[in-house]
Image (cartoon, coloured by chain):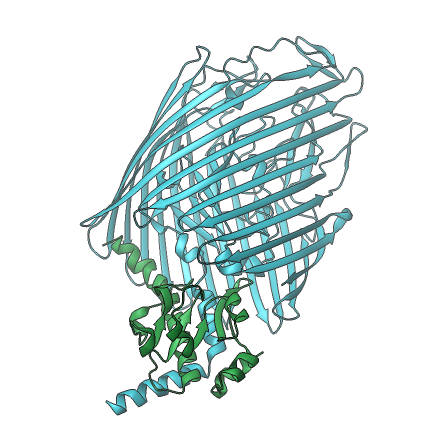
């Protein structure tokens, strides 16, 4: 017995000599992403807190620019729209974004990516991105991609931080957060102001610009199993080219306000979840044109346009989990109320008669998911979901269904994931009631897809292959004859392949290489295919007190081959003076040769403007923890 | 029997942070008490972070403990104040009876001992813990 105790003591003492190493190991193993991620919910990409900090990720844009199968694109109002199809304002309704347990959305666009695609990451702990038509338990409506942002927690972030950053064109950012944790009550608050100034472009003798200032406040308060959150945002800036095709505006402006109040509660050992969320959003747009430049059918020449879009959403959901034998069953009922108004419009300061076909949508949703563990290596997933969209004012209601089947195999080195799904997506209000191109008779579009992922891990390397094939039926397209959105007749085919290789070396160094290819049929030209490639090489090194980040993103073949290949090289150096004071430098698109995007001014005369999606920039910053 | 496959994929990681936290607590307990296998009492059976309790030499009664882990002093029985009190929150260090704490702050785990409180309790730490004294 004495020998045994002596042995334990020796082991303990040897560990004790390395208490700092244990603390570092504990910090790594306590990454919150390890608690929240769900490998069976889709093709998962995780950016841990350590990744975000060492990569100096300032906004979600920095992650989206190298997202598998996508490139960072914006619409003609300089808002995030990864699947942008200019001149349609928003084409990414199926890419949904969440902050903690709740979806960030606007009543008009459905998905909130349009407002939050460049949300700053200073209060975010980690990011999970689920591609491949992920699990239904994420939300009330289906998605092709789910982006989940998790805020920092009072449990891990007791104390505060101030940060300041300034750089190109006089852009700057300042923010502060403070957190406190006790057994009974925890809170976290964060306030930020970002002023983003970009290059101005001269086109048709007009200066077009996309500067903006974003102010944000986020606070959470937790007590036992209950949490309430408040999230408010204001954006003031330029609306770049405005929504209209036909002329270059001489001045544009956009003002956005967003308010979100949420509550989350868990009961019965966290197997019963009850969530509520209220959102109020408002967008004020103003575009001005020189005399006799913008001619709109039925209105004549327009010199000014003003619009106020308002929306409110209320979402509530109740989810329950059961573990019965080898079944893990999750079910949920959800309700969403949406009201929206796009009718406050003025052309040349005169309000035309706008008959908004409907302004209220009630969504009732139900899902059931069963994950069956056949044994330690095999898991089968079967899920169904359905929504009923109840619209007012005699507009037709829509009923949508989704089915998803999955199979996962794993052993110590290999993981294989197969997902099959057929999912109907209801058209969002901006496509059905937009005064510019809305069509309230649009039908739901249907995605049918198969995704296959193989992962092989060997020592400190990981190799991943992701393959997919899918079709879309009833895809909404802009009809140049009717000037309305219409359902595409016939199937649109798409396929993709991605290979990724990652290796960690020395203590914290990482290298990541990706090649991905996407092939999709052109909805506007039957039989034509677009082929685009993304290549990513990223390296993270920690040397002494320095964290060094290098990344090269190459985008090739975009816009059906019309976009020149983009080479975006970024470099970041962070100097950790001590544990609490960090000084950093980051340069984006250093050679000013990154991806560009083309926007139509007037398709009939082939008049268009091409601008970088991410401009060259250099920033210096400092953060202090207290 | 939750997601066997995910247990293989992930749950080993779930437990790993609790294992390491327990190892840190054990190391501290040995370094503070100078005993080979000190008995630990967790007040209110609560810590703000997970511990693998089966990896600790726990006792159910304060009077049997060599060291007491606390997250709060509210309602702590009088006989516990005679023991070595070690905190799990930074705020615990404000009380002069608490000699040190292992806690999360500023996004990282920290160990901190109060020189003044150690002196008051006449506790001498093992060499490997002395660098955490302030």
- Colour chain B is painted in: green
Q: Residue A598, how many percent across, how many down?
A: 65, 33
- Colour chain A is painted in: cyan
Q: Residue B62, how many percent across, how many down?
A: 34, 74
Q: Is residue A153 left or right of residue A58?
A: left
Q: Nearer the viewer, residue A173 or B124?
A: B124
Which residue sits furthest bottom?
Answer: A3
Is residue A133 at least partly visible in the picture? no
For the point 60% across and 17% down, the residue is: A436
Looking at the image, residue A183 lies above or below residue A522: below
Q: Is residue A216 left or right of residue B38?
A: right
Looking at the image, residue A486 lies above or below residue A368: above
Q: Quadrant of residue A244?
A: top right
Which residue sits furthest front?
Answer: B78
Q: Residue A136, how many percent across, how many down?
A: 35, 38
Q: Residue B81, how many percent across, how many down?
A: 42, 75
């Amino acid at each position: 017995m004495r020998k045994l105790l002596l042995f334990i003591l020796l082991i303990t003492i040897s560990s004790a000599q390395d208490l700092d190493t244990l603390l570092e190991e504990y910090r790594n193993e306590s990454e919150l992403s390890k608690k929240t991620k769900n490998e069976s919910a889709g093709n998962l990409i995780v950016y841990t807190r350590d990744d975000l900090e060492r990569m100096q990720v300032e906004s979600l844009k920095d992650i989206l620019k190298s997202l598998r199968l996508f490139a960072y694109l914006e619409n003609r109002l300089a808002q995030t729209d990864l699947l942008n199809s200019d001149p349609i304002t928003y084409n990414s309704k199926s890419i949904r974004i969440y902050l903690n347990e709740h979806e960030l959305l606007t009543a008009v666009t459905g998905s909130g990516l349009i407002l939050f695609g460049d949300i700053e990451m200073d209060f975010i702990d980690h990011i999970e991105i689920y591609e491949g038509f992920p699990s239904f338990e994420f939300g009330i409506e289906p998605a092709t991609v789910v982006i989940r942002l998790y805020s920092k927690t009072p449990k891990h972030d007791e104390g505060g931080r101030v940060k300041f950053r300034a750089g190109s064109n006089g852009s700057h950012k300042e923010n502060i957060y403070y957190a406190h944790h006790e057994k009974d009550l925890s809170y976290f608050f964060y306030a930020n102001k970002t002023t983003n100034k970009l290059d101005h472009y001269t086109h048709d003798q007009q200066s077009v610009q996309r500067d903006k200032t974003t102010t944000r406040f986020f606070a959470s308060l937790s007590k036992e199993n209950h949490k309430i959150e408040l999230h408010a945002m204001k954006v003031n800036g330029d609306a770049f080219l405005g929504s209209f095709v036909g002329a270059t505006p001489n001045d544009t402006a956009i003002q956005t306000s967003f308010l979100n109040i949420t509550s989350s509660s868990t009961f019965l050992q966290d197997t019963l979840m009850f969530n509520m969320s209220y959102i109020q959003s408002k967008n004020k747009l103003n575009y001005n044109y020189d005399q006799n430049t913008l001619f709109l059918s039925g209105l004549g020449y327009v010199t000014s346009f003003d619009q106020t879009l308002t929306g409110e959403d209320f979402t509530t959901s109740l989810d329950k989990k059961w573990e019965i034998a080898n079944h893990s069953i999750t079910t949920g009922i959800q309700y969403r109320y949406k009201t929206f108004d796009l009718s406050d419009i003025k052309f040349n300061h005169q309000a035309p008669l706008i008959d908004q076909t409907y302004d209220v949508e009630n969504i009732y949703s139900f899902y059931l998911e069963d994950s069956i563990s056949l044994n330690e290596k095999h898991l089968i997933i079967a899920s169904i979901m359905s929504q009923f969209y109840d619209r007012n004012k005699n507009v037709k209601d829509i009923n949508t269904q989704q089915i998803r089947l999955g199979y996962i195999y794993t052993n110590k080195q290999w993981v294989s994931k197969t997902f099959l799904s057929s999912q109907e997506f209801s058209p969002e209000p901006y496509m059905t009631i937009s005064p510019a191109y809305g069509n309230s008779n649009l039908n739901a579009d249907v995605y049918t897809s198969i995704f296959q992922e193989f992962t092989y891990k060997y020592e400190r390397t990981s190799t991943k292959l992701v393959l997919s094939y899918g079709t879309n039926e009833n895809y909404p397209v802009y009809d140049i004859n009717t000037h309305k959105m219409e359902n595409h007749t016939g199937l649109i085919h798409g396929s993709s392949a991605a290979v990724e290789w990652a290796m960690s070396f020395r203590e914290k160094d990482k290298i990541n290489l990706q090649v991905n290819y996407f092939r999709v049929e052109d909805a506007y030209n039957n039989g034509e295919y677009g082929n685009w490639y993304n290549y990513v090489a990223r390296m993270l090194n920690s040397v002494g007190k320095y964290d060094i980040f290098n990344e090269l993103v190459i985008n090739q073949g975009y816009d059906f081959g019309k976009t020149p290949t983009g080479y975006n090289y970024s470099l970041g150096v962070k100097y950790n003076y001590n544990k609490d004071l960090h000084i950093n430098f980051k340069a984006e698109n250093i050679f000013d040769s990154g991806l560009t995007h083309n926007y139509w001014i007037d398709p009939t005369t082939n008049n268009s403007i091409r601008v970088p999606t991410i401009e060259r920039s250099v920033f210096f910053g400092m953060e202090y923890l207290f | 029997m939750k997601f066997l496959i995910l247990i293989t994929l992930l749950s080993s990681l779930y437990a790993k942070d609790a294992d390491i936290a327990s190892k840190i607590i054990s190391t501290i307990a040995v370094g503070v008490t100078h005993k080979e296998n000190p008995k630990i009492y967790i007040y209110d059976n609560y810590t703000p972070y997970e511990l693998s309790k089966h990896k600790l030499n726990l006792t159910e009664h304060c009077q049997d403990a060599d060291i007491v882990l606390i997250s709060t002093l509210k309602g702590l029985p009088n006989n516990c104040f005679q023991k070595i009190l070690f905190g799990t929150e930074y705020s615990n260090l404000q009380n002069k009876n608490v000699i040190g704490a292992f806690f999360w702050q500023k996004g990282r785990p920290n160990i901190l001992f109060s020189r003044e409180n150690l002196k008051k309790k006449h506790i001498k730490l093992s060499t490997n813990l002395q660098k955490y004294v302030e």
